[in-house]
Image (cartoon, helix red, strand yellow):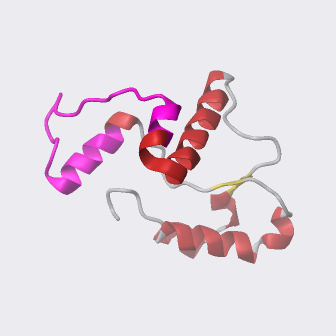
């Protein structure tokens, strides 16, 4: 649902965004712990403290396991780790996707738990 709302906002505002612009589109920022908590709540699994274990896997091993999809995902993790390690919270010239939405569309966005 949220993806369509953001795409509509970007397409509608295309002239003001500019070609090749990086548009950040997110409703909430989850930690790994909060994401697992939501997953556990939604599935009925891993709902208690300590019921989830995080296993570190190299990008190469992840790609070997998941193929092309894994390569795409691993490249995103590497990119965002670089950003975090260098204190970069926003790319120069990037556009906040929420700023492209109408009030009506902003109000219809859902959090992970709501969806």
Residue at 86% across, 71% down? 15
In the shown orientation, is residue 75 left or right of residue 46?
A: right
Whether 40 is among the magenta residues is yes
Residue 112 lies, with reference to residue 11, above or below; the image says above
Give coordinates of residue 52: x percent, y percent: 22, 33
Looking at the rendering, which quadrant does residue 7 occupy? Answer: bottom right
Residue at 50% across, 67% down? 2
Residue at 17% across, 41% down? 46
In the shown orientation, is residue 68 left or right of residue 91?
A: left
Give coordinates of residue 63: x percent, y percent: 50, 41
Looking at the rendering, which quadrant does residue 30 occupy? Answer: top left
The C terminus - image quarter: bottom left
Give coordinates of residue 50: x percent, y percent: 18, 28
Give coordinates of residue 29: x percent, y percent: 48, 44
Looking at the rendering, which quadrant does residue 54 occupy? Answer: top left
In the shown orientation, is residue 39 left or right of residue 11?
A: left
Residue 19 lies, with reference to residue 75, above or below; the image says below
Whether 18 is among the magenta residues is no
Residue at 15% across, 42% down? 47
Along the viewing direction, whichever of 78 and 48 lies nearer the viewer: 78
Q: Which residues are magenta?
A: 34-63
The residue lying furthest to the front in this view is 64
Along the viewing direction, whichever of 65 and 59 lies nearer the viewer: 65
Number of marks drawn? 0
């Amino acid at each position: 649902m949220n993806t369509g709302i953001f795409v509509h906002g970007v397409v509608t505002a295309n002239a003001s965004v500019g070609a090749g612009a990086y548009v950040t589109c997110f409703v909430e920022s989850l930690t790994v712990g909060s994401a697992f908590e939501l997953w556990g709540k939604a599935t009925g699994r891993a709902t208690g403290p300590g019921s989830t274990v995080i296993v570190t896997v190299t990008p190469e091993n992840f790609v070997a396991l998941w193929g092309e999809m894994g390569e795409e995902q691993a490249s995103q993790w590497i990119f965002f780790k670089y950003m975090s390690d260098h204190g970069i919270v926003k790319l120069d010239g990037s556009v906040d996707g929420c700023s492209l939405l109408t009030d009506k569309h902003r109000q219809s966005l859902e959090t992970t738990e709501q969806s």
